Image (tube, grey):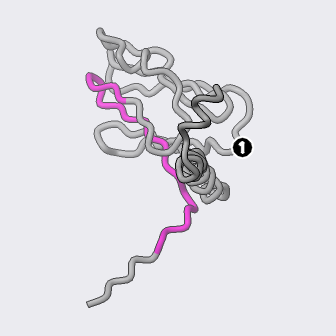
Amino acid sequence: MKQIFRMMKPWDVVLLLLFILLSFVPLAVFAYQQSLTAGTVYTAVISVDQEVVKRVVLTGHEGKEAFVIQNSDFASNTIEVDGQAIRIKAATCKDQVCVRMGWISRPGQTVVCLPHRVLIEIQAEGEQEDEIILSY
């Protein structure tokens, strides 16, 4: 161990400490980004054929809720809301991909049932949008 310290120069120690400090920058950036979304309301928007069928506010939602989206006589999806997460619990489609996608709870996440054309998307509402300043 003493041989390693003898080989190190003073600037090596400075660079090593600088790299260690820089490794914490992503943590600080993500923590700052999360603090900006503290006042937002998350809403699950359920649409069939690009038409909004139902909106479920997930922020502050407690308990369980389930409802059925009936597309036709044979096509239906059972949607379950548990706390602040939502999923497609059951579907009458053959592939069941939408059921296996599981729970979603963050903005931008989606669950899609392609055979029934059902889309569940989490949207953040009340988010402060940055102003775009154009300079010529």
Examine the image and state in which quarter residue 56 appears. Answer: top right
Number of marks drawn:
1
Q: Quadrant of residue 62?
A: top right
Residue labelled with disc 1: 60
| Residue 111 position within the rendered picture, expressed as x and y whole percent measured from the top left | 41, 30
| Amino acid of disc 1 | Gly
Vertical arrangement, residue 50 with respect to residue 126, above or below: above
Where is residue 55 shown, x and y percent of the image? 52, 44
**Residue ranking furthest to the top:** 94
The residue under the point 60% across, 55% down is 37
- Queried whether the magenta region covers residue 13, the answer comes back as no
Residue 121: within the magenta?
yes
Quadrant location of the N terminus? Answer: top right
Residue drawn at point x = 59 percent, y = 32 percent: 85
Q: Is residue 46 left or right of residue 1?
A: left
Mark 1 burial class by Cα count in 10 Å: few <14, some 14-19, many 20+? few
Q: Which residues are magenta?
A: 112-130
Is residue 66 rendered to the left or right of residue 74?
A: right
Q: Is residue 54 above or below residue 14?
A: above
Q: Viewer-proximal residue, 72 or 12?
A: 12
Viewer-nearest residue: 48 or 89: 89
In the rendered image, residue 3, in percent from the top left (x then y), is placed at: 59, 29
What secondary structure is found at the residue carrying circle 1?
A: loop
Say above or below: 81 vs 18: above
Rendering quarter of residue 133: bottom left
Of residues 125 and 136, the one nearer the viewer is 136
Residue 25 can be seen, yes or no: no
- Whether 67 is drawn above or below 7: the answer is above
Depth order, front residue of 125/49: 125
Residue 128 left/right relative to 75: right
